[in-house]
Amino acid sequence: MFSKNIIPKTVNPDLKKEREGANFSSEEFAAWWAGGKEKLEFNRSVREYMYKDFDYNENQQLYYKSHEDMCEFAVKSSIDVAKKLRQLQARRNPGGNEYWPTLFDEPELWNLHRAGNPFSVMYMVVVDALKTQCTPEQYKEFGVRVERFEVTATYAQTELGHSSHLRGLETRADFDRITDQFVLNTPSISAYKWWPGGLGQCSNHAIVMAQLYIDGQLKGLHMFYVQLREEGTHEPRPGVHIGELGKKMGFLGVNNGFLGMKNVRIPRTRMLMRHAQVHRDGTYVKSPVEPLTYFAMLSTRCIVARNSAVALACAATIATRFSAVRRQSPIDTSLPEPQILDHVTQQLKVFPEIATSLAYGLAYNYLRELFNATSRDINLGNYNRLPELHSLSCALKVMSTSDSAAGIERLRLACGGLGYLASANLCNIYVNTVAACTYEGENTVLLLQVGRFLMKSWRAAQSGAPLAVTASYLAEVHQNPEFGLWSGSWDNLVKAMQFAAANKTRLAFKSLSNRIDNGETERMASSHTGIELTQAAQLHARAFVVHNFLAEVTGPKSKARSPALNLVLEDLLELYLVNVALNNMSDILRVVHLTDEDLNKLQARLEAALAKLRPNAVAIVDGFDFGDAQLNSTLGFHDGNMLERVFDAALKAPMNRKSVPKSFHDHLGPFMKSNI
Amino acid sequence: MFSKNIIPKTVNPDLKKEREGANFSSEEFAAWWAGGKEKLEFNRSVREYMYKDFDYNENQQLYYKSHEDMCEFAVKSSIDVAKKLRQLQARRNPGGNEYWPTLFDEPELWNLHRAGNPFSVMYMVVVDALKTQCTPEQYKEFGVRVERFEVTATYAQTELGHSSHLRGLETRADFDRITDQFVLNTPSISAYKWWPGGLGQCSNHAIVMAQLYIDGQLKGLHMFYVQLREEGTHEPRPGVHIGELGKKMGFLGVNNGFLGMKNVRIPRTRMLMRHAQVHRDGTYVKSPVEPLTYFAMLSTRCIVARNSAVALACAATIATRFSAVRRQSPIDTSLPEPQILDHVTQQLKVFPEIATSLAYGLAYNYLRELFNATSRDINLGNYNRLPELHSLSCALKVMSTSDSAAGIERLRLACGGLGYLASANLCNIYVNTVAACTYEGENTVLLLQVGRFLMKSWRAAQSGAPLAVTASYLAEVHQNPEFGLWSGSWDNLVKAMQFAAANKTRLAFKSLSNRIDNGETERMASSHTGIELTQAAQLHARAFVVHNFLAEVTGPKSKARSPALNLVLEDLLELYLVNVALNNMSDILRVVHLTDEDLNKLQARLEAALAKLRPNAVAIVDGFDFGDAQLNSTLGFHDGNMLERVFDAALKAPMNRKSVPKSFHDHLGPFMKSNI
């Protein structure tokens, strides 16, 4: 009936009207958000080249495939991306690396890896790890081969029975003095390597983290470069038991795998020996620098924090456009059904998530600068900033992943039943983002580390010792614990979050101290104070994010932006600050008294902020500048032809190719007949 | 290496120890929870019969299938369940219905419908709707055929462009006086019927909700019984455009479909005419009873509220057993890694969800009694209780689905990476439960209805008019708005929630009244007050749930339970009340002043409640009495052999059957070679 060419070539009039009604320039927003006009143009030119033959229909078929076909498709897609990116590099800047491999796993290209990238660990972790852990000779021998994709390698650390507690890893590498080899073994089921992306069927090498034994003596964890499959045939090598973990909630084609080893022998020179060494005679030389081993993990953690915010911005774009073209539930029965974006309850579901993605994007910018500064320091032998960087990267990784995942799911639900369809892509964005709450440091484990950083910081505040910049408010609150007057200004709201965080830190410190005074060891006391420590860590992270958001919007950088753009950013800031304050009010009320009138005013400000953002909402998400293929959502196309695309995608479901399914003849038909 | 017979026949010693250490009887809990010893035995005997040849391995393969194969498998599985249930009925009580069809869609049998039940709408909605909407002659003619499964029918109400706002439905049925027929048409893409379970390829009939026109005059929405496919061949009938919606986040094999009609003709007698009629001459007789049309939806809503709580209890069982056998992160470095159930942060993730599933289970019991009482009243022509039943069913549907979905996802995340595996089944439980936030009344839409009920109730409280039982606290607070002293007793905590709910209701009422005073229509004012109305509705629901939980545990029913069981239930009550109070503290602090000391005490009570539940946690979830096949989770087996089952499931992933995948030869191998 309506099955041919149903998608209009024109823009949905509701969406057109929204864009025309905005009172700032999406283009200026986009350039600012991308980090400058040049970067924006670079991004767009990359997308244009890479997505030029993107086939939406082929892409829609992904979710109908069997797991095996999906995995095959994932390998094909990612290899295609690699080829094309290298082509682009060769064409535009041969010898450089700003396209390949730099962009291989960047958000710009996410949807070209149709079912996830089974080789992402290689360029995200392995190459960096080899660069920092190999001797120059080692890197030349096998590191460059990974960098050039002559071989494929993954990073095998966690085990089936062991993840957060690294020292508990069981995989062992025994030095065999006679043959000058290490012998790797998986002593139990719980010692199987578990999770590495691409380990299943896509990697012929891995960096394996194992307990080093020399003459039966444990020397602690070290990294070993192990060949897992033959280069020519891809067959697993003798003693290597390898495979994939099976279906997961998301990460469908990432080919996460397991690895067991039985007397797998590698040359002694395949232990990564830049920092620690085993000599030919079995002499062991300990690494002089402990922290560096974990620097690669730290860098990945920062990227995870950023990617989650990008994913949230994707979902917010989809849900905002959807809400502008979906009409539902009359407000006034004499009028037609309104755009659901006009319902205040819908605004409250959507707009705070736009602000949240912005807040974490800006927080990441700060984190990246701290990371770069710390890297420079470390190269000069100065490790002072490392604890702060570690703590901030943990805090932002946790909050960005958990707020983004929760936000994406709220946005998906805000699209009603249509958000449940695979063609909306929101399910997919959710299941992939929520995974980040667990990988690269489980969120609770990381919060406990931030909590311990806060305990140290509070102790320093008490003794007047210097504090890290991002924790310095603790000293201020400690010295002057009276909040003073509530005004509700932006500064005041940020201060309230800092006082709430400091107060929780103080309470946690008190509980911890009490437990120690009562005879518990510090570790045990710390464990028993876990709930308060994680709560303090969360508030600490929130206090940083609101503080940074305020500084970015009202600070000196505002001078580089037009007044119109600044006004919009201020509206987003206002919404974010008021919403965060309301959501954390029970903690705020412990440090400052708000009258009933103050609270009513905050509620009114929340609603006013939503109303103020209403006319600019579509233009703001346009400013995130995602391409249609990046969003890959029937609900979120730039042209707003939402219903038609949802309908078109349903028509293309493979079950609809036949008028009668096999199951009717085999099961349903005979059963109905038997009942007559 | 470890690939054969790796699953021990014994119970994991950690789990064994937990059970031996419990200080109450799981069996007594189970009998109480099931609603009596007889009911428990009935459930067990049903499970024993129905699951006796349940094949875990076959089941694990489900998620590897293509969508089409999954749908075929769903039809086969559900027909198998139907056959087997009828067999059971015939064997144990021929002529009765307590097995078939009563149990067809009950939680006891969920996992026998391997990919969801494509025929669930038939017995959940259609048969009831036919019973209440058909004339006796109609029911005899075609209603019984559905009841007997001679045909398959679904319920087609929502459209692609219309869901919550029923009056906006576009599908039309025009009376053709000449042929004595109705002519059904789908005037636009947005008018396509969208979502009905089983509509895609599994139904040959549907109840279609359409706008009735007689001589071009609109007579409003009516139900029509329409044949969609030929009975013999299952081919779509002329003018019927039908198919499935395609892949979704969950409900994989439920075969949700779309339906467009072009001049589809049905006899006049296929309009369901018990209440409204169209005579041969075109005379239209209006229905005298409006509300009854929606009674079937109300009943379904109650079931949805219950099912969500059951799903949460499943997830809590899995996560608790997992936490008892998983060892991770040493508290004291001199000791082995503890069961993660010993970490307070883990306890806080798991135990409140156990209590929450209990709270909603008990709330459902109240709701079911109210439902039964209202049904009896209605049969006597008394509709007085209907508004309260409507409001309470909406409130509990919303809170049970949203709290359960969020809780299941928290529990899944509490199982770390292993919770992300399909074999853990937690993903599946989540995606199916979260769908209920949207179907059978979108949660925000329902909350707004509860909000309107609260506005009416508050007005009644102001004028001294009588209130529904579950809203009577509003009158009490209105008459005596001073909370009085905070004691922190259970009664006091419940009272605090009631005062918080009443206060939000008062504030919403004030905002609503202000808007009306400023010239807005009541509808518009109500829409603009949406945020406060939904917040009041949520607090109202929470106040009911805590009040009911307290009454069930400490009321007269406690006399039928042993002191040991009562103690455990009191521990769960304590945790639930304290946790709900802490989570809603900002609203509580607006009605009663708590000192810093009071708040510290609550925090201490939270931790104490967790510690008290710790030794009984495993025994409590054992008391939910789920069978292994019901949980269907490698993490949650009764024997606790978790790691081995996770490992075993991974080994059975189909990709692991071959040592080298096709993608190596086609894509990866050639690419690596080209780089050398």
Image (cartoon, coloured by chain):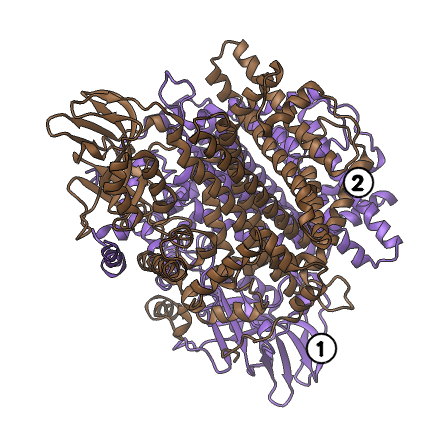
Chain colours: A brown, B purple
Q: Residue at x 44, y 47 (%)?
A: B427
Q: Which residue is mark 2?
A: A600
| Residue A130 picture quarter | top left
Determine whether label 2 and label 1 are within 8 Å by CB: no
Left or right: A638 in relation to B491: left
Mark 2 secondary-structure assignment: helix
User: Visible in this render: residue B440?
Assistant: no
- Give A484 or B273, whichever is nearer the viewer: A484
Quadrant housing the C terminus of chain A: bottom left
Tell me where residue B154 appears, x and y as whole percent.
Answer: 51, 66
Tell me where residue A300 appears, x and y as whole percent.
Answer: 43, 40
Mark 2 vs mark 1, CA separation in Å = 46 Å
Q: Is residue A160 above or below residue A32?
A: above
Mark 1 packing: few (<14 Cα in 10 Å), some, or many (20+)?
A: few
Q: Is residue A35 above or below residue B162?
A: above
| Residue A473 picture quarter | top right
- Give A236 or A135, whichever is nearer the viewer: A135
Q: Is residue A641 above or below residue B180?
A: above
Residue B218 numbered tag: 1
Left or right: B465 in relation to A404: right
Q: Residue furthest bottom?
A: B178
- Going by the numbered disc 1, the residue's amino acid type is Leu
Q: Residue furthest left?
A: A178
Mark 1 secondary-structure assignment: strand
- Give B303 or B436, whichever is nearer the viewer: B436
- Going by the numbered disc 2, the residue's amino acid type is Asn
Tell me where residue A117 appears, x and y as whole percent.
Answer: 37, 52
